[in-house]
Amino acid sequence: MWSPFLLILLCVAAQAQVEGQSISGPVLGFTREATGGAIWPIIGVPGAAMLAGRLQLEAEVRDVVISPMQDFALAVRIDNGSVVAINTKADPPVVTLVRGTHSNPSAIGISPTGSAAAIYDSETRSVQVVGHLPQGAEVLREFDLSGIEARPTGMALSDDAAIVLVSFADELWAVDASGSWRVGSESSATAAFLPNRHDAIVADDLTQTVFLMMNIDQSATRVPVLSAADGLESFSSVSVSRDGREVFIAGKSGRIAIVDMDTRRSVLTECQCRPTGLHPLNQGPIFRLTDASGEPMTVLDYSSGKPQMFIIPPAAQ
């Protein structure tokens, strides 16, 4: 049976969706639409949350990527292909051009604290690193990946904007000012940096292992974190808590592993969904597992130290 708070929240959210009014009150974070062309605020608290009306932007966009801190998003304008930063805290949202970026990039990644972003351009096969986000966004440097012809499937960037990990269909590459090199085996892999460190979590599909790669640009020491024997295989995404104490690994089947980095103990849980990623929300370790669509959205809440799943209803049409 729904609580009075949730009933009130449902009414407020439904009214706002119909009228397009701004929402006041607790904001759990933001989600992108499954197509990548819209941003929806999530209002409420874990277990009692709803989608408010979608943000009204001055131009149509695609490939939205939301900052882990929920304060801005990056996207590509459909009309001219330029990269823009969207200030989600402003009402109405402020859209700012990220000057100096190549038009129509094919992939965007944001660092763990949202301090920098990496933008991949398939035409030049280069990665541009953007800093001073969101208001003063500018290109800091550009890395050459012309030796790799494949299209990237994902990117991870260190908070100091020094190292980028680029995932391709069958390999993972690292690139910095000194050059580029392959990480892991010749297989599909996904990665995430720890906040404010040159250490990253890498999930390697071929070996069915997850490992911590410490000091990627120096010793690149590998520390085992998880293997198929722990009950998870065929990885889809990885993420790290804001304090770096827990690692979250999503399997393509919907199983989620949570690893305590101090004890190396892991906990498994099921989301009964097909995760599109592990997207951080506000407050403790809370992750959105799916995007906004016509179906309910699944969220993982680990703020209590125990995994709990809750559902956010689809937006009113």
Image (cartoon, rainbow, N blue to C red):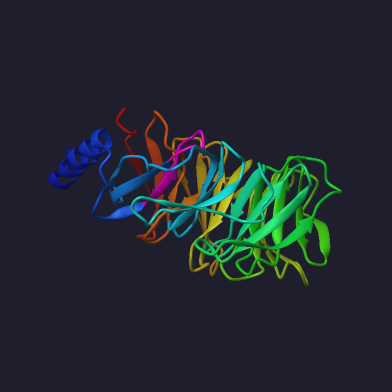
In this view of the protein, which residue sits in the foreground, 270 or 28?
Answer: 28
Residue at the spot 26% in from the left edge and 48% down from the top edge: 23
Outermost residue, right side? 147
Along the horizontal axis of the image, is 304 left or right of 73?
left
Q: Is residue 30 magenta?
A: yes
Does the image show residue 234?
Answer: yes
In this view of the protein, which residue sits in the foreground, 265 or 35?
Answer: 35
In this view of the protein, which residue sits in the foreground, 56 or 254?
Answer: 56
Q: Quadrant of the C terminus?
A: top left
Q: Position of residue 158 (x, y in %)?
A: 64, 64
Q: Is residue 258 magenta?
A: no
Q: Position of residue 135 (x, y in %)?
A: 50, 62
Q: Position of residue 116 (x, y in %)?
A: 59, 62
Q: Quadrant of the N terminus?
A: top left
Q: Main secondary structure of the magenta part?
A: loop
Residue at the spot 31% in from the left edge and 40% down from the top edge: 53
Res 210 → quadrant: bottom right
Q: Which residues are magenta?
A: 29-38
Residue at the spot 77% in from the left edge and 42% down from the top edge: 123
Does the image show residue 225?
Answer: no
In this view of the protein, which residue sits in the foreground, 151 or 265?
Answer: 151
